[in-house]
Amino acid sequence: MALVTVFSCIERALGFIYRIFLSRSLGAETLGVYQVALSVIGLLMTITSSGIPITVSRLMAKRHAIGNKSGKYAVVTAGIFIALIISVPLILLLLIFGDNLTFLVTNLQSHKALKIMLPGVIITSVYAVIRGFFWGEKRFFTYSVIELAEEIVMLIAGVILVNASTSNLTGAEKASYAVLISYVFSFLMSSVTYFLFGGKITKCKTELKPLITSATPITLMRTLTSLLNTLIAIILPNRLIASGLTNSVAMSKYGALSGMSIPLIYIPSTLIGSIALVLVPELAENFYRKNMVTLKNNVEKAVKCAVFISTLIIPVFIALGKEIGTLIYNNLEAGEYVQKASIIMFPMSISLITTSMLNSLNLEKKTLKYYTIGAFLLLLCIWFLPNVIGIYSLVVGLMISYIITAVCNIKLISKTCIVAPKFTVFIVASLVFIVPSTLLSYLLNNVLILVIPKTLSIIITGIITVAFTYLFYKIFDLFDLTELIKSKK
């Protein structure tokens, strides 16, 4: 897990660097335009392939558990077949009737950016299946290298193309070309690697039904996620306009929150994703082999690790959010959003890790149900609350949604494991730890900023705050990070 985490952190760091570049080169309003198009692409990719990788991984783990390793290539072939059957007709129709894409995005510039990225949906759908093969084979290093290389290609292409653009709006189009280039690169690299590892295309008729049955609930849930992001990108700016803001101001606020602040708030998802990536095949094998004690121990460790990660970061963002936003994006408004929305990390971390685990345990329909409830409440918030709290209606909606899914997931996990995992005390204690750590961070930064440069003050305060929070866990002997790392190497 340590290796996957390192690669994920490097990849996310490069993503942040690129995001900073885009925010400074394009501005908040144009970044919002680009973000709208990207959210639609995310929706399309979710529809075509999102449930397949984890299902391919789980079915391969099942084949390993029952001693049928030869069936893994049939599983991969079935995944590729399904991905192409869905993606090719969908994208061809959208390209043929491209002038009518305004039903997806009303903004003309977002419409242009969307058309540029559309072909990438097909090839990325195939790459998603191969990614599931890497997971199932536990070739995490290979997967991590390809993902990192894709991020590097997009960053390099984006910097070159955006710098060559003649205006901010054409810059959004150039950034879209960079996305397409990165998709092509990862598809080619993963396909070659798959065949080098002995992968092949074979008969897959018997694998189609179980793959479709398992992948459909996950795809529906992730499609709802992408659809939700798209609806937010469309509804929220319009509701802000209805509340009295101009189109420019509404798009600027949306761009600052969704394109600058939320990526920072989703920092824990990088580390949590690494944990989930390593655990999914292992949990599936333990589940099918009925190794319930091992299953329970792994579930406990994963949930505690996710909570631990968010608890380390939240106090820093609450205390230093404004300074961090200004330092990174040169945008005070984005910093304010980071500060006020950072508490979302806590339920978000629990929700993300538990959803991944339940999906690996063949409980996709339940997680879909819980997610739908949370998504519905989120939509109600962004529809009715902008008149009251403006752009923060999205923050409140996300908070409610993640709390709902986190609580429901934890209850379901406790019922699923014969030996119920124990992490309630750990979660409560972690919430308590946030308070003194935040106060320390506030006080320390206010003192240091008087005698040293602001940037240095932020760095020192952040390091000391994280160390102080970790000290609580050591004092009360609640969590041993090295145990998790060693057990997943």
Image (cartoon, rainbow, N blue to C red):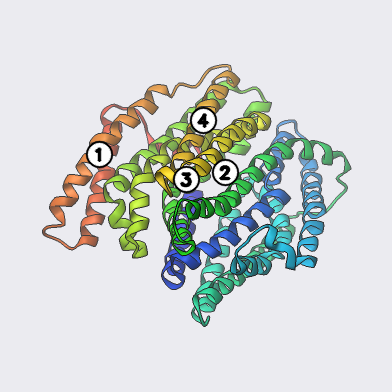
Separation of residues labelled 2 and 3 (CA atoms) = 28 Å
Which of marks 3 and 1 precedes in the sequence?
A: 3
Which of marks 2 and 1 precedes in the sequence?
A: 2
The location of residue 148, given as percent across then percent down, is 54, 60
Mark 4 crowd level (few <14, some 14–19, many ≥20, 10 Å Cα): some
Which of marks 4 and 1 precedes in the sequence?
A: 4
At label 3, the amino acid type is: Leu
Q: Secondary structure at mark 4?
A: helix
Q: Residue at x 58, y 36 (%)?
A: 376
At label 2, the amino acid type is: Leu
Mark 1 or 4: in front is 4
The location of residue 154, given as percent across then percent down, is 55, 68
Mark 1 crowd level (few <14, some 14–19, many ≥20, 10 Å Cα): many
Residue that numbered label 3 is attached to? 394
Mark 2 crowd level (few <14, some 14–19, many ≥20, 10 Å Cα): many
- Find the residue positioned furthest to the left: 451
Q: Secondary structure at mark 2?
A: helix
- Judge whether residue 318 can be spotted in this image: yes
At label 4, the amino acid type is: Ile
Q: Residue at x 58, y 16 (%)?
A: 418
Q: Kindly indicate the quadrant of the structure image that contains residue 362.
A: top right
Please give the label number shown on residue 404.
4
Circle count: 4
